[in-house]
Every structure is written in C-alpha cells, then in structure tokens.
Image: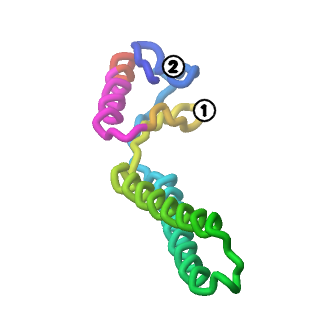
Amino acid sequence: MVTVDEDFVRCDGKSFAIRSITSVEVREQPLASRSLVLALGLALGVFGFFTLLWLLVAVENAMEFRLEPSDILLLIVLGFASFFLARATLAAVKRTRATVYSVTLATTAGEREAFVGPSPEEARDLQVLIEQAIAGNH
C-alpha cells in the first residue's frame, strides 16, 4: 500500500521525503510468471498425452508388461488428470493480464518501485498524486 501526503510517500514500510524525489515514472512491464505458467501447462499436457499413449501400447501388450488392472486405472487417471490440469492452466493464462504497471520514484539516493499492479489507471493516479505533492513543495 502506498500513501502520499504533503511531506512523504510511504510504501512497504519505507518513507521517501517529497523533497528528495526528483521524478516519478509509470513503467509497463511484462509479467514473467505468465510464461512459467504457460510452460507448466504445456508440460502437463505433453505428460498427459504420453501417459495415455503409453497406456494404449501397454494395454495392447498387457501380458508382456504384466500390468494389473489397478495399474491401468492409475495410468488412465494420471493421463486424464494431466490433460485437465493443462487445460485449466492454459485457460488461467488467457485470463491473466500480460503486463503489470509500476510507479518508480527517482530520488537523490536512486530509484525505487513504489507500486506494482495490474491497473494502469491506478498507477497513473498515484503518479499524479505524487507529482502534485512535489509541485506543492517546490
């Protein structure tokens, strides 16, 4: 949570004096974890496909592989569970935003992200609040 008053910007337990802030910038950043979730979904789908493919081969050669009915049932459940998890994961990726927005404060001591979130409007509103506080102090 970020709060702004006439003297300080407070974020994550740290306070920045308005007078020490030299600029405020809104940055658009790609969401890195989205790629990781997508890779996980694809891996689950591939795993499910090969599990079911192996099951088909194993059922045809059940005597050679010496599979018990419980083994076959386990493979069926594992294969379909992987497919459904992959499908749910990929659907979740489609629903998430691909970018996040951050408000970066440039101070005399360096740069610091004051806010990170999915809403560009919220980031821009915070930028305006900080700029107004800076303008009021100079």
| Residue that numbered label 1 is attached to | 109
Check the image and name the residue furthest to the top: 6
In this rendering, the answer to whether 119 lies above or below 94 is above
Name the chief secondary structure element in magenta: helix
Q: Quadrant of residue 7?
A: top left
* Element under disc 2: strand
Residue numbers of the magenta segment: 117-132
Q: Amino acid at mark 2?
A: Ala
Q: Is residue 138 left or right of residue 61?
A: left
Q: Amino acid at mark 1?
A: Ala
In this rendering, the answer to whether 12 lies above or below 68 is above
Instruction: First in sequence, mark 2 or 1: give its number.
Output: 2
Q: Quadrant of residue 43?
A: bottom right
User: Was residue 127 drawn as part of the magenta stretch in this picture?
Assistant: yes
Camera-nearest residue between 88 and 104: 88
| Residue that numbered label 2 is attached to | 17
**Residue shown at 54% from the left, 35% from the top:** 112
**Residue shown at 35% from the left, 31% from the top:** 127
Camera-nearest residue between 136 and 102: 102
In this rendering, the answer to whether 68 lies above or below 33 is below
